[in-house]
Image (tube, rainbow, N blue to C red):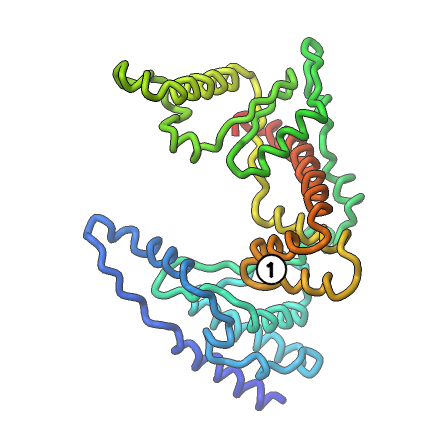
Amino acid sequence: MQKYVDQLLEMLQEAHNNRPAPRYIELPEEMECLRDVIDMEMSMEEDEQIMENIFGVQQIYFPPENRLSDEQIRQLIQGILELWRVFQYEADFRKGEFTEREQYTKLVEQWKKSHPLLKGTNGTWHIEMFDYEQIWDEKERRYLTDEEYFAKNPLPKLEDFITEKNTAKISDEQISEMAEMLDTGYHVCYVNPDTGEVEIIFTDEMLCDYGISWDDDEEDEDGGDEESAHGWQDEFNADVKAQMARIYSWQRAVRIEKPESREAFGFMENFVDEVIPEGELKKQFWNALSKKHPFRNFNHMVHNCEYREEWFKFKKNAMKEYVRKYINKSIQKAKQNDWFH
């Protein structure tokens, strides 16, 4: 087996030469400093490829871990990681989460997965090799149950941060409204933990489209004709600036944004796991989530099956729980940082 491993290591070394030549990008001198960024963006826009094709080394060449010695496992891990770095890929493992044999298996599994092909950029594409389904404690070197994690990291109750003078609470109706507006993707929410006030405002990108900025305190300089022609916009701008002024007047504020992609992906995973019954449809959903464009694939399936309404209810509840947890976590973080974030 060692002779075969040595041949495979040589093959991995030779694959270093398969990295594509840097693409030619003609840029003006003043944009030369942005070459790496532009190249990375261009790579993101191209179709991804599986590692087999990128490296020119087939996955089938890698022996299963149970046929390799510990030393051979270490040799192959080193050879794989060196090849990845030549192509600007980096494997991110959490300290102590997996044994070397498990790391080897996970690295080899990536050979059939798609990734951007980086050409000439100095940037690095990080590939997270985590078990997202479990909570890893690096100090204790073991997985924690949800109960153990929250026992160690208790979330403060929102009412603990309400002042004696102002005893207003965040109502379930407010939570529902924030969840609904965040789900549109066009809004962010601000919560005053002292008074229970809530302000729902357009995202910074949307405000920018209307010519409104948090840093802009000056009145518009347009003439009267413009004002009469676009009276609705003047009224809209005035309302938004009034919202901003109220938020600025608060002593503390929690800003809530829409869920990040990873968390939104978790909503879909949980829905398939908890709602879709065992059978062919469930397999199709898991298959859709494992392919490229999982959000688009999932939406196409869920809107064309009998569980469409169940998905709306499930997502609504998931978003409400997300808002509750976001407020609590933000307050916990804010104890050590500036309240405006």
| Residue found at x 32% / y 20% | 229
Rendering coords of residue 130 (x, y %)? 63, 58
Q: Is residue 144 above or below residue 55?
A: above
Disc 1 crowd, CA 10 A, few/some/many (<14, 14-19, 20+): some
Whether residue 316 sits left or right of residue 190 in the image: it is: right
Residue in front for this viewpoint, 30 or 86: 30
Dividing the image into 4 quarters, which one contains the N terminus?
bottom right
Whether residue 205 sits left or right of residue 337 in the image: it is: left
Whether residue 168 sits left or right of residue 251 in the image: it is: right
Rendering coords of residue 234 (x, y %)? 38, 19
At label 1, the amino acid type is Phe
Residue in front for this viewpoint, 133 or 290: 290
Q: Is residue 314 above or below residue 95?
A: above
Asked if residue 60 can be seen in this view, the reply is yes
| Residue found at x 64% / y 15% | 195
User: What is the secondary structure assignment of the residue under circle 1?
Assistant: loop
Q: Quadrant of residue 165?
A: top right
Reading the image, the residue beneath label 1 is: 93
